[in-house]
Amino acid sequence: MGDSHNIAEHANSVQATDKIVIVGAGMSGIGMAAQLKRLLNHQNFEIFEKSDDVGGTWSQNVYPNLSCDVPSEVSLRLPDKAPDFKPDWSEKYASQPEILDYVHHCVRHFELEPRIHLQQECTSASWSEEDAAWTLWFNDLVRHKSYSVKARYIVTAMGVLNIPNGLDNLPVLTGFGGQYFHTSQWRDIDFDDKRIMVIGNGCSANQVIPWILNERHPKSLVQIARSAQWVAPKPNYPISRFTKWCLRYIPFAMRLRRLWTAYQLDKGFVSMRNTQAGSRARQTASDEIKSYMKSVSNPKYHDILLPSYELGAKRAVLDHGYLEITGRENFTLIQCDGIRAVQGDNKRVLVDAASNRHEVDIVILANGFKTQDLLTPMKVLGINGKDLRETWKAKGGSEAYMGVSSNGFPNFFLLAGPNTLPSGNSTLHGIECSIVYITRILQGLWARSRRTKGQPLFLMPTVKAEAEFNAMIQQKMKGLVYTSQVNTWYINKDSGKNTLIWPGTQFSFWRSRCVSPIRWSDWMVQRRDGK
């Protein structure tokens, strides 16, 4: 990777004329860089990443039993010169180590190492109308120094699952006498003969708890769950050598397999609609899932485990062996709203919100991420010092035109931006589509710049286009099963606005970003001189 000691000098050695800074080296940042080279033959970019490795969530989250929750061939694909890039996933749902290996392979394949600068945290970006360029400020986490970089364009690839909730709503744990940590900050410690508490009931808890009880020998494990989850079976299995051979050598086999799997996932979108057909589909699916949950889990916990809200209001959790272990003698499930007090001479007695007392040695926080705090801790100041976070706050939550750009912030693009996440489909495929859309925008902008003899141009959506687009998004959202009455990380708790989900099929998202003509009338394109 790039030498952190020469980052500022290297990053500023090229004029900002067409330089692109990508903030984040997860799968979206790596994908953006790869497509800049592949589709636009553009080499003038740098990637900055705050952690010590590429991979984003797949390098930051290393807890045991972690795997993707969408079939690998759909959810895990970065661009290559050939469409069938990864035909040899070992399982239907790839594990975290295999996914991270794949990201590293992509970095090597596209020769991105010299352009990636690790342990560099972007703290702010401000637009200069005089220069028609951005100035970004970074903290070098190795040298403990700050520096600035200029660029014509910014692409943020920071994800939505990067800031853990941690001790939010659990401040009393600061006085806990044992160890505590979030699943995204996993520690390889001795769990044998320990009294363990897991706080949370989402995907990470579903993965971690079975591993602890099956692979280690704790004295006890108590789980604190605030609400129930729909827990569906996860039919994972190894991919056979014959299947891998077919996918690698038979023309179009991998593409057809991917399209078929994507179609199967997209077909389930009908169950997200508030229609008669959607209601019937939800009822059928919920009956099947409830039957599975009842047949596998401990009957004494059914009142806690079985949801009362409609299937789809939250993203369903896939079962990693969790339901079965609820029958273990050393497992206890408590439904309440967190921890109320820390007691005892050794500060290892935790009193939960239901007044139960628990002697605990280790607390594992599986309580999710700050998904409504996009771009944290980055402060973005656009034209006339317009603050992006304050703009979003005034609108009741984040929003952007086509999920990638906002008025007042020229040449500023988002990946995994507002209302770009799919319902029950691959997040990475949605990011792929946004990447293609951004490259199409840049290609058109640069073609116009050549016609103006290289005069620097900048663009942003018009106020009208952005407002109409987001009004359409929220109007369509009313026809779906999502509701502010059910606590979910898709929805801004203060306003009740769904800021993350795309209210349509994945096919419609792909078509709107990758196929449909760009509506240039929705974009304001200007030269630096204002013409």
Image: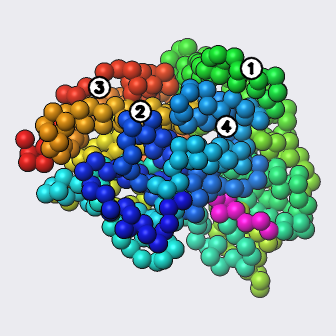
The three-letter amino acid code for the residue at tag 4 is Asp
Q: Position of 181 compared to 275: left or right?
A: right
Mark 2 to mark 4 CA distance (whole Å): 29 Å
- Label 2 or label 3, whichever lies nearer to me, is 2
**SS class of the residue under badge 1?**
helix
The three-letter amino acid code for the residue at tag 3 is Ile
The residue indicated by pointer 4 is: 69
The three-letter amino acid code for the residue at tag 2 is Leu
**SS class of the residue under badge 2?**
helix
Mark 1 to mark 3 CA distance (whole Å): 37 Å
Mark 3 to mark 4 CA distance (whole Å): 32 Å
- Residue 218: x, y in percent? 88, 63
**SS class of the residue under badge 3?**
loop
**Residue 73 or residue 104, whichever sits in front:** 104
- Label 1 or label 3, whichever lies nearer to me, is 1
When asked about the image quadrant of residue 475, the answer is top left
Q: Magenta stretch: give its range.
A: 182-189
**Residue 149 or residue 95, whichever sits in front:** 149
The residue indicated by pointer 1 is: 246
Query: What's the residue at 48%, 68% (across, down)?
Result: 4
The residue indicated by pointer 2 is: 39
How many dots with numbers? Answer: 4
The residue indicated by pointer 3 is: 518
Query: What's the residue at 91%, 61% (across, down)?
Result: 217
- Residue 339: x, y in percent? 66, 66
For label 1, the crowd category at 10 Å Cα-Cα, with few meaning under 14, some 14 to 19 and many 20 or more, is some
- Residue 325: x, y in percent? 86, 47
